[in-house]
């Protein structure tokens, strides 16, 4: 019975530390898009952590490593939100614009070739 209570206390302690660190990092990095952290220790997967639907999920069993992964996921989220996503939006807009130019040029060539074949 003592061992089970010790495991529960350790779990509660880790969850508390993760929540405190989540709030601290959120405040320091001024992250508005994340709502909470959920600790789901899991030994079987390759994934240590991820952000889904504004929630940071941590799968690492070790409490110290779980804190490291939380920091990693939150920094990654911030960089992705403010640098990667806007750049991808610009790149996608440029691709879309270029696609229209290519389509118009293709149509012009098809029309010219069609007229040439009509002669």
Image (cartoon, helix red, strand yellow):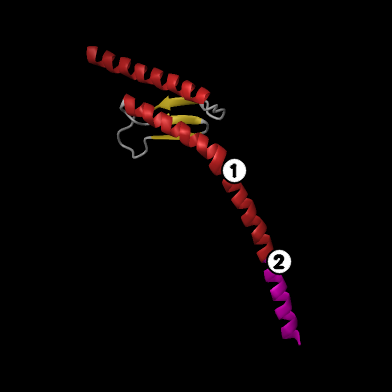
Frontmost residue, 71 versus 4: 71
Q: Quadrant of residue 81?
A: top right
Q: Quadrant of the C terminus?
A: bottom right
Query: Who's the residue at 59% across and 51% down the image?
Result: 91
Q: What main secondary structure does the magenta stretch of the protein show?
A: helix
Frontmost residue, 100 versus 76: 76
Residue 58 appears in the picture as rendered: no
Classify residue 99 as left or right of residue 115.
left
Choose the circle earlier in sequence order: 2 or 1.
Answer: 1
Q: Quadrant of the N terminus?
A: top left
Q: Mark 2 = which residue?
A: 104
Residue range highlighted in magenta? 103-119
Frontmost residue, 46 versus 64: 64
**Quick one: which residue is furthest to the front in this view?**
28
Q: Is residue 87 magenta?
A: no
At which x and y percent is residue 61? 31, 28
């Amino acid at each position: 019975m003592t061992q089970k209570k010790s495991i529960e206390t350790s779990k509660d302690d880790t969850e508390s530390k993760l929540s405190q660190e989540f709030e601290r990092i959120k405040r320091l990095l001024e992250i508005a898009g994340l709502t909470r952290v959920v600790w789901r220790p899991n030994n079987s997967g390759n994934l240590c952590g991820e952000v889904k639907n504004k929630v940071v999920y941590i799968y690492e069993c070790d409490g110290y490593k779980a804190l490291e992964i939380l920091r990693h996921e939150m920094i990654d989220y911030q960089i992705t939100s403010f640098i990667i996503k806007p750049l991808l939006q610009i790149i996608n807009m440029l691709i879309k614009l270029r696609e229209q130019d290519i389509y118009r040029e293709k149509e012009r060539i098809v029309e010219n070739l069609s007229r040439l074949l009509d002669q």
